[in-house]
Image (cartoon, rainbow, N blue to C red):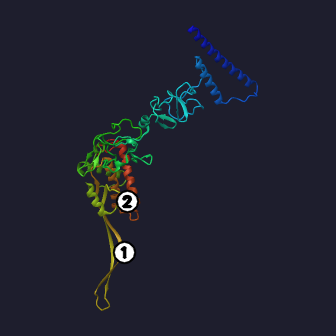
Amino acid sequence: GAYGRSVSAVDEGDAALAARLQAEEDAGSRLSAGPSSRPPETDDEALARALQEEEDRAGRGGPPSRSAPTGPDPGASGPFRAPPGACPGCLRAPSVFEGHITAMGSKWHRGCFKCGSCSKPIGESHFAVREGTPYHRGCYQDRFAPKCGVCCQFIGETGGRRGIAGGSVRFMTHPYWGTVFCPEHELDGTRRCDGCDRMEARGGRGVAAGGYGVSGGDGSGSTGGEFAELPDGRAMCLECASTAVIDTTHDGQPLYDDVCVFFSNHDMPLLPTRPPLHLVSQDTLNDADDKEGWHVGRTARTRGLCLFEEHTVYTVERTPDFGGGFFPVGFSERVVGQSRGATVVNAVVVLYGLPAVCAGAILAHECTHAYIRMAGGYPRLRPKIEEGLCQLMALLWVENTAARGIETMGVGVGG
């Protein structure tokens, strides 16, 4: 008896499918024969009719239609607009006998409301939405939330308050490296590498490398180890410390030779009268800069100096002052002319402890100042233009170093 009922249900479903296919064929014949008095069926009406027929067959136990529409990929991201009344997951309208949930303005089957990241059903009452796709809150955080590269915590994670002010997430981003970090790390003593300006991650994990959607809380995005510390208190990441220029004789002079050869190849020789090089601490450099006064108002921090003496010859006219009597009681003086005398470059001073490429760029900058002074000073050259020329030579030296390395120091390409 059970077998007979099953066969009957299948036959009934096949008969319904055949009837629908015949109706579609007849409709096509009527359209090809000429215009019909009945208005054409819209896409939404046709889809709703197909869905209703599919649901009727499913209720009778018949086979599904071969032309029935299917829903979007549960794991696919991006918005998807389902027909009115249909579940956006499978495009079938939930019946009154099926359990469903209402979310994002639609009714979903419970198994169709899935996370766009892990593709598992979302059973919680709170969830996140991005570009029309729902996510578990945890999956959304792992994929999109900013994560601090210093403390390796998601920004705004603790109690929904950390890093949040006025309903928005607040964080800082390094302008060059793109590292994302909490605003409080700007003032809490977090160390920065004096060579590359990258911040140090907590727990001795090296340079901070946080960003968006960085998975894991173990600081796996960070590289290197604990920062090294120079005698004057400055910190260096291990990558920069590996080529640090510390000693004038062993480190500084080979680098100076490379810069001088570069200048000679560009018809700007400093030899054989190149000024001496000195590697000094930050305090010594600041004291010399205060006396020199060249960088006042031009830079927040000084890493190099070109120390020079500029001589000016004044022509003074002295006339006797008789003071209203017959005998002179003194002389009055006035400047009637002046001329530039010799300019002597005493030394080139660079901050010690910087990585080789950084120190070399600063050295090339200061050597351009030295060349301009030894070439006559160019009295009409404005200081802003002179600084621009020095930066240009520093950039050219860096590009040259990136292509061939620093041969005099054994630093390879990219080192």
Q: Nearer the viewer, mark 1 or mark 2?
A: 2
Instruction: Determine the residue positioned at 31% across, 86% down.
Output: 321
Relative to 369, is 67 above or below?
above
Task: Please state the horizontal and vertical placement of residue 323, each as a whole percent of the image.
Answer: 31, 89
Q: Is residue 281 left or right of residue 50?
A: left
Q: Which residue is mark 2?
A: 298
Element on which disc 2 rests = loop
Residue 398 locus on image (x, y percent) = 36, 48
* In this view, 407 is above or below 94: below
Residue at image point 57% right, 32% down: 82
Q: Which residue is mark 1?
A: 337
Disc 1 is placed on an element classified as: strand
Q: Which residue is farthest front?
A: 97
The answer to whether the residue labelled 1 contacts the one labelled 2, judged by CB atoms less than 8 Å apart, is no
Quarter holding the N terminus is: top right
- Considering the image in quadrants, where does the C terminus appear? top left
Q: Give the amino acid at mark 2.
A: Arg
Q: How dense is the environment of label 1, judged by Cα within 10 Å: few (below 14), some, or many (20 and up)?
A: few
Please indicate whether residue 211 sits to the left or right of residue 24 in the image: left
The mark nearer the N terminus, 1 or 2, is: 2
Q: In the image shown, does 130 or 6 lie closer to the viewer?
A: 6
